[in-house]
Image (spheres, rainbow, N blue to C red):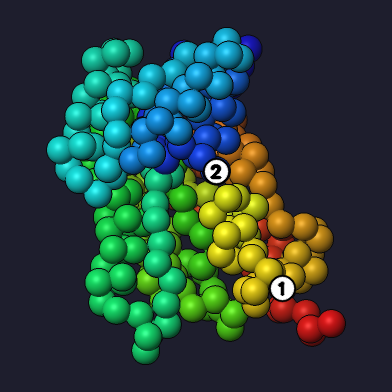
Amino acid sequence: MRRLEGKVALISGTARGQGRAAALRFAAEGALVVGGDLLHEEAVETQRLIAREGGTALTPGPLDVTDEESVRSWVDEAADAFGGIDIVYANAGAVRFGSIDGQPYADFSVTLRAELDSVWLTTHVAWPHLVRSRGCVLTVGSTAGLTGSLTNRRTAHSASKGGVIALTRQLAAGGAPYGIRANCVSPGMIDTDGSRADLLADDHPMRGIARHIPLGRVGTPDDVANAAVFLASEEAAYITGANLVVDGGWSTVLPGAAH
């Protein structure tokens, strides 16, 4: 039997990258996927890809995870369509990089709204459904929430992802009386369209990061999706409040010397 058979899974940010990979992987495991993204047409294409593989998915409309009305409409349509919600995967986010002395406050605020407030808002709105289903919450942290960086000016990103990890632990505490589990997946460097245009670009100091990763490569969206499926499944029934780091061992070692 597939690991998420019949589970209703809300996954935000399904237009591309890690969100699309998660949607495809969850559907392959039998979940009824409700996706959403501001990039609506690309999210609809993810729905088509799921249908092509025989899965079930719904993409109600453009989703702005920083807007309460948009999130509430998304959650309500999912619950109406499938009769409830079992899994909330708060994946969507957006980041503006910058140093403490160079980043405008507006950019810092936008990043925290997109990466931290959005997780709280999505979970807050879906919480009554999770209470009824004794469901689970998955969040996306980052190695940026665990360590500082000498090569990436990521003040806001570090603050938001550290907040996501802490919020997840509190969700685990608050959800335990209702049978709700909450866990975080914290990726390291992942090869996506976004990272190739920025952190892995030829002119970025992190472009050669793979040689400093113990497993010798940058991660893929599927690496993250596989970890998320495990945490959403009954195989993780006794796991809550965890932060599963998916980074090839990057955060466990000191950086190597440049060569």
Viewer-proximal residue among 91 and 172: 91
**Which mark is on residue 253?**
1
Q: Which of the 4 image quarters holds residue 131?
A: top left
Give me the residue at 36% from left, 24% from top. 59
From mark 1 to mark 2, how far is it between C-alphas? 26 Å
**Farthest residue in the bottom direction?**
101
Image depth: mark 1 or mark 2 in front: 2
Within-10-Å neighbours for mark 2: few <14, some 14–19, many 20+: some
Q: Which amino acid, mark 2?
A: Gly
Residue 206 horizontal/vertical position (percent):
65, 72
Viewer-proximal residue among 147 and 112: 112
Specify whether residue 38 is in view.
Answer: yes
Residue 133 horizontal/vertical position (percent):
33, 23
Residue 113 horizontal/vertical position (percent):
27, 58
Viewer-proximal residue among 96 and 143: 96
- Please determine whether, in this image, residue 152 is positioned above or below residue 247: below
Q: Which residue is mark 2?
A: 17
Give me the residue at 47% from left, 67% from top. 145
Q: Which amino acid, mark 1?
A: Val
- Please determine whether, in this image, residue 209 is positioned above or below residue 71: below
Label 2: element kind: helix
